Amino acid sequence: MISSPVNSTSHSHHTLKFLTAGNVDDGKSTLIGRLLLDSKAILADQLSGIQQQFSTDRSYDLARLTDGLQAEREQGITIDVAYRYFTTPTRKFIIADAPGHEQYTRNMVTAASNSDAAVILVDATKLNWEMENVDLLPQTRRHTLLTNLLKVPSLLFAINKLDAVKNPDIAFVHIKKALKKFTQEANIPVTHIIPISALKGYNIISTIANNERYRLCENVYHGPCLLDALTELPSQQHIVKCPLYFPVQYVQKLSETQSSPTQHGQRIFWGKIAAGTVKPENEIIVQPSGLKAKIAKIFADALQNEIPCAEAGKSVGLILDREIDISRGDWITSPSISPLQKEVQATLAWLDDEPLIIGRLYWLKHGHRWIKAKISSIHNHLNIHNLEKEPAKDLQKNSIGQVSLTLQQPIPVLPYNQAKDVGAAILVDTATNRTAGAVLLQG
């Protein structure tokens, strides 16, 4: 789980990574196709490839732009996270098209952990929109809860296919009310709830003023179109006001000509700063060995351009003032960090077909380090329908629960909601090597 680097607080020029999620056939792929088409991010040869056969009105099968895998084309569903890129005059965007199928929730979790925002689609045609108390689909609830759990900074709902219902205004008002009720009960902040038609292009991009195409629910909705709302969202900010946490990803040995062994170490330790800042002369401790040193140099890139400091989100190379034993998977940290932990509490999004049971051993990947982890207890699981935490003996697929883990070796811990790249880990099944669970450490 890696979040994208941000270099300043101004967001207008920074790339926004956003996730689209929702149920199968809610129109996610069509929405992304529409964004790409209307923002002119599609090449002419792609357009001819997706133009509907026998079509006289130049209508397009927009979903074909994003459903890239052959298996997806054949089944008509999205099963992998597909990344798409487009640019407007004011901003660059990266879209993660996450699968809607329940069996592919793990892909959605992967995409969410990397995103600045989430757009959750809600298909108006699948709901009892005539009723004042609309029942939301379980997958809408699950994706919303996971988005919040993974601390995606901005959450938008796009109520789709309103062009296909008898009374779009009433449908929008009733569905919006249900979404607000659910998110308020779950204590989840919502940035926007926008009525759209991905297929027709309503409320997606407001490029043509007063054009009939862009009017949808205008009696009951007066907010921005989807692209304008996305353009104004902030990019993720990394945690810089805390001790240094630097997971070592790669160790590069310098040749004799490049480094004088009497001055400092002869190896560069490459990685991405997970939290904090680093400067030359800073004292550090290597975890888990406890060896101490000072930072001698910081390199910005493989050409070894030196920089005076670096902060969270930056990928850098560090040279220490003396030669000590460090390998991939170790952490370079400030001396002031909390003690390492072998017993950890975590929120767990369980993704495997096999249920999670107490006493089982898994691989835990934390940073770039693999260690054995045992499930010592399961405290509860979250009922996505009534939002109650209920006692649990196991965690079934797609459940969210609170667990305790006993680790083979201690690790540095910061709560996930304080520093994603330190507080995130994954559990991997030792037999199948499948990613079994997303671990959010509680500190």
Image: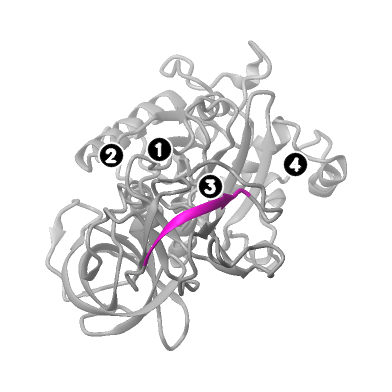
Amino acid at the residue labelled 3 = Lys
Sequence-wise, the earlier of marks 4 and 3 is: 4
Amino acid at the residue labelled 1 = Leu
Nearest to viewer (mark 4 / mark 2): 2
Residue 99 covered by magenta stretch? no
Q: Position of residue 333 (x, y in %)?
A: 37, 58
Mark 2 vs 1: CB contact within 8 A: yes
Give the left or right position of residue 30, taking residue 131 as reference.
right
* Residue 46: assigned label: none
Classify 10 Å Cα crowding around label 2: few (below 14), some (14-19), many (20 and above). Answer: some
Q: Which residue is mark 4?
A: 60
Sequence-wise, the earlier of marks 4 and 1 is: 4
Mark 4 vs 1: CB contact within 8 A: no
Q: Which residue is mark 1?
A: 155
For the point 26% across and 40% down, the residue is 182
Nearest to viewer (mark 4 / mark 1): 1
Q: Which residue is mark 2?
A: 188
Q: CA distance from mark 4 to mark 3?
A: 41 Å
Element assignment for label 1: strand
Classify 10 Å Cα crowding around label 1: few (below 14), some (14-19), many (20 and above). Answer: many
